[in-house]
Image (tube, grey):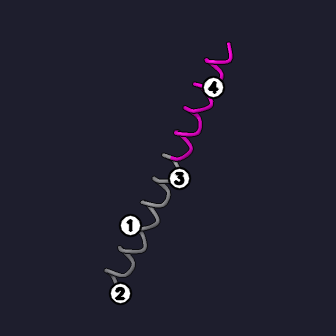
């Protein structure tokens, strides 16, 4: 039970981290595009 909960928590944290990373990547790409446009 305890390990199951820890596993769920860990996978949730990893998923959140990947989402944040994807968001940062998109933001970075948008910044590069806007810099090239100018």
The label on residue 33 is: 4
Disc nearest the viewer among 4 and 2: 4
Circle 3: element type: helix
Choose the circle earlier in sequence order: 1 or 2: 2
Q: Residue at x 42, y 74 (%)?
A: 8
Q: Crowding near pointer 4: few (<14 within 10 Å), some, many (20+)? A: few
In which quarter of the view is residue 4 placed? bottom left
Quadrant where the C terminus sits is: top right
Say the numbered circle drawn on residue 35.
none
Eye-nearest disc, 2 or 3: 3
As for residue 4 lying within the magenta part, the answer is no
Q: What's drawn in magenta, residue-wise? A: 22-38
The local crowd at label 1, few if under 14, some if 14 to 19, many if 20 or more residues have their Cα within 10 Å, is few
Q: Is residue 19 above or below residue 30?
A: below
User: Which of the two labelled residues, at mark 2 and mark 3, occupies the earlier sequence position?
Assistant: 2
Q: Which mark is residue 10?
A: 1
Task: Classify mark 3: residues with Cα within 10 Å, few (<14), some (14-19) or many (20+).
Answer: few
Residue nearest the viewer, comparing 18 with 13: 18
């Amino acid at each position: 039970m305890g390990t199951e909960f820890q596993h769920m928590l860990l996978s949730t944290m990893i998923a959140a981290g990947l989402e944040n990373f994807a968001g940062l990547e998109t933001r970075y790409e948008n910044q590069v595009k806007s810099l090239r446009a100018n």
